[in-house]
Image (cartoon, helix red, strand yellow):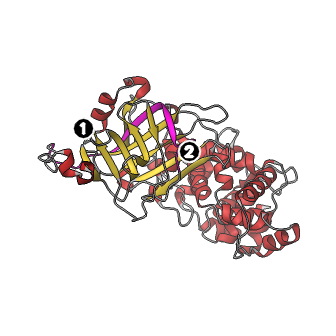
Amino acid sequence: MGASISSSRMSKDAAAARLSTDNKQALATFLESPQEEGFSAYLRRYLTSTDDDKALAQQNLAHLLSDDRFIQTDAMYALAGLGADKPSSLEAFVECVCQAAMKRFWNGQAGQLSADGWLATWVLTRPKGALLQVYGNSECQKQQLLKHNSLGITMAGLDDESSSKHLEEWLADAALPGHVSADAWRVWWQHSAEFHELMCLALSHTLYPGQPGSAADAGFVRLPRIAEHNLRGPQLDSAHTSDLLSPATGWALSRELPQEARLNWARMYSSKYDGRSWSTFKKAIERRGSLLVLVREMPDEGCAPRVFGTYIDNDLTRNPGWRGSSLNLLFTIHPGDKLPPGPVVYRTTGFNDHYQYFNYATKTLPNGFGVGGQLEHFGLWIDSGFTNGHSNAAATFDSQPLSSHTEFTIDAIEAWLVRPTQRLDLDDEEGAQKSAVESNPEAAA
């Protein structure tokens, strides 16, 4: 399919001319390397039908890297093998892409992180609006939408149950070989920004297996409109591992953080390795810098435990009032029991400035760590007793409860430093001379 599409839109000479010398060298090395499984097998099959057909390989690689979205869409469909004589399933292809992408993004560090299995399903259902506008209609309307790629209709009347049903229909098609047409692929591909990034990572991992930033990586693969800072993962502290932060979770969350918070991540606290202690936890996170805090709730009968947490942009300093930055985030990782698995990220809305609360050793105010919402009704709350917490809907982030139930029991907590503090002083001069009641007048009521 790759050759027929290419010949109608771009000559072999023109296609080859679009490839850089680095890409040509990487392609030659790849074709000479031993046969591999996974994404490498898909790529090898697409690039050339015979090992010595270098012109066809250069032509097809140029189509994969083309900035023409029509050529690229058709080329990717052929790469996935969805229209081959013995077609693949879209689900199997996406899983292979995700595996290769995580190897590149974490640069061999993925073994330090916990296992997960939600990434492929999450990616398949990310363009939810586009998919529901297709699968939420009659078969006749569905075919017309696919044919004309007309996605401007309203989704009114699609309740949660209907949405879930239509997404299940799409996932069922994606799991079966030959059940995703070229038109359905076009709708999905053109609305899947996350998968574009994963494809860049997978191509780079396969064609440029060297260390990112090295001479061998000079031709790092970037599809059009993909920012380079989304394609390089943080450097992890090699001495530490994580039971809560998986490769997919780390990738998804890093995309939401400021660029300077994506460079180096160091685990500051783990309830598993450092002991279950509020005192140890607060010392590990206070005045350190920007943090990722992850919580896993205790499993509840009938519900898979969720991992959820927050990104804190400014230093945590003891204070009986609200502090922090509008860059703070709340997030939860759905296990896939009711909604498609994967992360849901909530950003600040500007409704109020209740970004973070960190207080201890007071009698009239809550002692613990909170983000968003109101006192006693936080978007996320970890009590200083370090056993329980709660998560309420919070206008600060327009967020829903992060945990399975409003009240939760803590199973595990981790805190990761993602950007060291910029403070030059270590004295909490602001508020240090005020009592808890003086700093928070409503506490006297």
Q: Which element is circle 1 on?
A: loop
Magenta region, residue range: 401-426
Q: Is residue 416 magenta?
A: yes
Task: Using residue 132 as the reference point, say whether residue 85 is left or right of it.
Answer: right
Q: Which residue is mark 2?
A: 333
Examine the rendering and report whether any part of residue 253 can be seen: yes
Near-viewer residue (319 or 189): 319
Q: Which residue is mark 1?
A: 362
The picture quadrant where one finds residue 158 is bottom right
* Res. 245 mark: none
Q: Position of residue 184 (x, y in %)?
A: 77, 63
Residue appearing at x 24%, y 38% in the figure: 362
Q: Which element is circle 2 on?
A: strand
Label 1, label 2: how many angstroms apart (C-alpha)? 33 Å
Residue appearing at x 36%, y 49% in the figure: 375
Near-viewer residue (135 or 157): 157
Examine the rendering and report whether any part of residue 109 can be seen: no
Q: Position of residue 188 (x, y in %)?
A: 70, 62
Residue that sits furthest to the front in the current view: 445
For the N terminus, the quadrant is bottom right
**Kind of residue sitting beneath label 1:** Thr
Q: Position of residue 88 (x, y in %)?
A: 80, 49
